[in-house]
């Protein structure tokens, strides 16, 4: 039997069929198009792809967590 090994990790790793993989990729594509329409961008930094947005509030509204350095993460700590 002819075959090839699928090496993608993360997005389709738990899929049990090609139909499930296609649905997962289509869902991801819809999200990427929505992010692009909202002004998100991909930046390559040190061989990593980073999804960025200049509006931190919109970034947070999408449920993303800013992976900026510790000095930037301190802004997330609210005074009580």
Image (cartoon, rainbow, N blue to C red):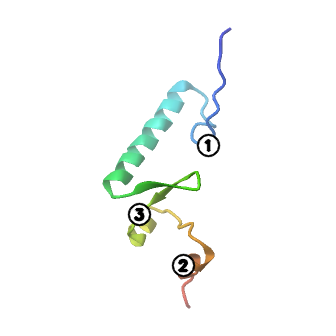
Percent position of residue 5, x then y: 66, 24
**Residue 3 left/right relative to 48:** right
Pointer 3 or 2: first along the chain: 3
| Residue 17 figure quarter | top right
Q: Quadrant of residue 29?
A: top left
Q: Quadrant of the C terminus?
A: bottom right
> If you read the primary sequence from the N terminus, does the residue marked by circle 1 or circle 2 appear first?
1
* Residue denoted by label 1: 10
Task: Write the residue at 39% across / 43% down.
Answer: 30
Q: Which residue is mark 2?
A: 76
The spot of residue 27 in percent (x, y) is: 44, 41
Task: Give me the residue at 61% from left, 29% from top.
Answer: 16
Q: Residues within 10 Å of mark 3 (few under 14, many from 20)?
A: some
Element type at marker 1?
Answer: loop
Do the residues under discs 3 and 2 have CB atoms within 8 angstroms? no
Instruction: Give the residue pinned by disc 3.
Output: 53
Q: Nearer the viewer, residue 64 or 54?
A: 54
């Amino acid at each position: 039997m002819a075959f090839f090994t699928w090496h993608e990790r993360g997005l389709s790793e738990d899929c049990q069929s090609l139909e499930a993989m296609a649905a997962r990729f289509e869902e991801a594509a819809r999200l990427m198009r929505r992010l692009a329409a909202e002004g998100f961008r991909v930046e390559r930094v040190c061989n990593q792809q980073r999804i960025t947005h200049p509006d931190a509030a919109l970034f947070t509204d999408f449920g993303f967590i800013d992976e900026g350095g510790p000095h930037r993460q301190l802004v997330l700590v609210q005074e009580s």
